Amino acid sequence: MKYNVATSHPLSTMAGMEALERGGNAYDAMLASSSALVVVQPHFNGLGGDLFATIKDNGYYCINASGYAASAASIDFYSRNGYQEIPKRGSLSSFSIPGLVASWKIAAEKSVMGIGENFKRAIQFAKDGFEPSRKLVRAINRFDGGDEDFNNIYKGTDSWLVQKSLGNTLETLVTEGLDSFYNGNIADKIEADMKEKGGLITKKDLLDYKASITEPVRVNYRGYNVYTNPPISQGLTASVWLRDLNAYDLAGMEHQEYYDTLIKTMHDAYNIRRKYVYDGVKLPENIDDMKPDNDQPGNQKSNLSDTTAYSIFDGEIEISAIQSNYMGFGSGHSIKGTGINMNNRGSYFSLDSENKNSLKPGKKTFHTLMSILASGKKDIILGTMGGDVQPQVNVQILSRIIDLGGNMPDAIAYPRFAYPASIYGDSKVYYESTLRLNHYEPVDDLNDMMGHAQGILIDSDSEAGVDPRGDGLLHYMKEKYFK
């Protein structure tokens, strides 16, 4: 295909493809797919969440639309109120400013169709409803951290999900402009709800927020330039890992040696992650100067992050993007009357003032979100959910394509390993049982721990791949929604 879209839900993919078919560019498809994902995968992302992207458009650049801590969020505040760690749910976990809508403003400035056209399908899915995936229904039934406004929207969902208030909010963004989220009617509603529920975000916090455009981190891997997000994103982890893998002939290795080598070099990359990925870091100019420390973290397993990634190609522009509310539905704090589910990304901060990731007003926490573009004999657009394992998913797929000559669908579907260690702790290495590895811990195949990846491989044509571990391969009838 001359253009392509790969997302983690078929309705989002169809919305993006429709934008391209109607003459839109990659930014239009991004807006259509991104807004649809907010509606059809609320257990992975939302209007109250973040976005990172890596984009090829007359050069390469990244978008960082992650939030900083509200002005009232401080170690002193939590200490005075008797907290030894930041809550994972509730209004005291929802203090990271949402950045997703600000990223849409960047995309909208480069799009060729209007916001109303690009949000049309998302509004339709929200107001008319859609058939939720089994994973979404299961996530709703298992989630017990929601406030009354959250529960009124989601609890009791079975075969059809309607989110009218979310649809109304998307319509407000169309009629009043995207800035209304940060300085308008929507911002007023966020501030009022925060006051009512004891939250920390004020309208001034929202007004001061801007998404940023940054230079990507680049590494050459076997003739491919691989681009990803700089810190505070953990994308650097994949960059230094690929740097080190250049020293090994992976294509000539037997099965066990191949995976032992990936895992051995991964540990050094994750030590570098702990050393260099935090807000305010000064990176060495040369990636080769980044070396791991020998410190070993305690045994604290990661909280797996639920995110949703997507890849877009319009024949020229390439976009790899990922958005999230952090842990599933996020904080469980839903803004009354809006359908906005606030993220709980701020709960990843440490209340230890000596920690590199310590909480401070206006500071951004370490972020697991990352996106990948690679350019060599072919171009690769790639992204995955999976929290701390995202670099592992991306590197394993890149290696299967670049080193082993795989195609995109097979590289994504192939069994994987995962090392779900946070920056605060260590973990065992797990693998999907079909890999049949020694020394590590087997788990069931098609395991959510291994992430849900989406990608596009571009040569003379383009080839999309979506992960069988996620919702992207559900067989929805196009005629059911796209009339």
Image (cartoon, rainbow, N blue to C red):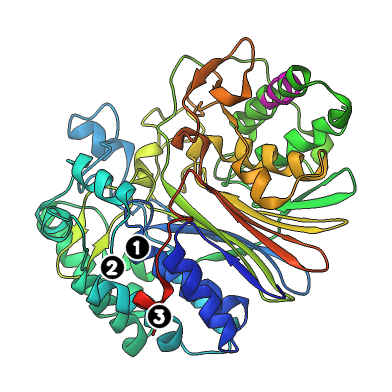
- Tell me: 161 left or right of 48: left
User: Is residue 98 highlighted in magenta?
Assistant: no
The kind of secondary structure the magenta stretch mainly shows is: helix
Q: Which residue is mark 1?
A: 40
Quarter occupied by the N terminus: bottom right
Question: Residue at horizontal 71%, vertical 56%?
Answer: 216
If you read the primary sequence from the N terminus, does the residue marked by circle 3 or circle 2 appear first?
2
Q: Secondary structure at mark 2?
A: loop
Q: Nearer the viewer, mark 2 or mark 1?
A: 2
Q: Which residue is mark 3?
A: 482
Circle 1 residues within 10 Å: few <14, some 14–19, many ≥20: many
Q: Depth check: 420 or 212 in front?
A: 420
If you read the primary sequence from the N terminus, does the residue marked by circle 3 or circle 1 appear first?
1
Q: Which residue is mark 2?
A: 130
Q: Depth check: 10 or 89 in front?
A: 10
Image location of residue 12, percent across then percent down: 45, 67
Quarter occupied by the C terminus: bottom left
Q: Which residues are magenta?
A: 260-266
- Tell me: 268 left or right of 105: right
Task: Examine the rendering and report whether any part of residue 160 can be seen.
Answer: yes
Question: Residue at horizontal 19%, vertical 73%?
Answer: 164
Circles 3 and 1 in contact, beta carbons < 8 Å: no
Placement of 42 over or under 268, stated as above or below: below
Q: Amino acid at mark 1?
A: Val
Placement of 103 over or under 42, stated as above or below: below
Circle 3 residues within 10 Å: few <14, some 14–19, many ≥20: few
Circles 2 and 1 in contact, beta carbons < 8 Å: yes
